[in-house]
Amino acid sequence: MDWKEFFKPTKGKIILFIVILILGVFSDGFKIAVFGRPLTSTEKLINAIPKFTSPGINALMRDDGFFIGYKPYGTFGMVLEGMVHVFVDLVYWYLLSCLLVFLFRKIKKRT
């Protein structure tokens, strides 16, 4: 499989991209909070899901600024930063869907 075929949109990649997009958007605000006891390993894993499903939006919502630690002030800077974070997540989700389809085809070819 060459790079052109890897990045070429197919029905499977688009469907998987939409599923990952929905998971990324809905899991971004999901957190488990417990009081009076430490988090279990399962709860820690669930709390880590947004970091993997939407790294750009997650960083924006944590108020980390952009990935280099820059925090813009003013409406224009925040809107521009938000657009960059959403774009980063869209690219990330599409690359993830391409990789998953590639791995699925490779495993299916072996069996």
Image: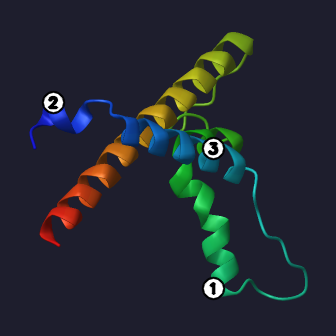
Q: Residues within 10 Å of mark 1 (few under 14, many from 20)?
A: few
Instruction: Tell me which amino acid carries mark 3.
Output: Ile
Quarter holding the C terminus?
Answer: bottom left
Q: Can residue 68 be seen in this view?
A: no
Q: Alpha-carbon distance for marks 3 and 2?
A: 26 Å
Residue holding disc 1? 41
Q: Is residue 106 above or below residue 45?
A: above
Question: Dot 2: what SS?
Answer: helix
Instruction: Tell me which amino acid carries mark 2.
Output: Lys
- Asked if the residues shown at circle 1 and circle 3 are in contact, with their CB atoms under 8 angstroms apart, the answer is no
Instruction: Tell me which amino acid carries mark 1.
Output: Ser
Say which label, 1 or 3, has the lower sequence index. 3
Q: Alpha-carbon distance for marks 1 and 3?
A: 25 Å
Depth order, front residue of 73/61: 61
- Left or right: where 52 falls relative to 6: right
Which of label 1 and label 2 is nearer to you? Answer: 2
Say which label, 1 or 2, has the lower sequence index. 2
Depth order, front residue of 33/108: 108
Image coords of residue 20 (percent x, y): 53, 47
Residue holding disc 2? 4
Residue holding disc 3? 22
Image coords of residue 71 (percent x, y): 62, 30
Question: Dot 1: what SS?
Answer: helix
Q: In this view, does 84 lie above or below 26?
A: above
Depth order, front residue of 19/40: 19
- Asked if the residues shown at circle 3 and circle 2 are in contact, with their CB atoms under 8 angstroms apart, the answer is no
Q: How crowded is mark 3: few (under 14 residues within 10 Å), some or many (20 or more)?
A: few
Which of label 1 and label 3 is nearer to you? Answer: 3
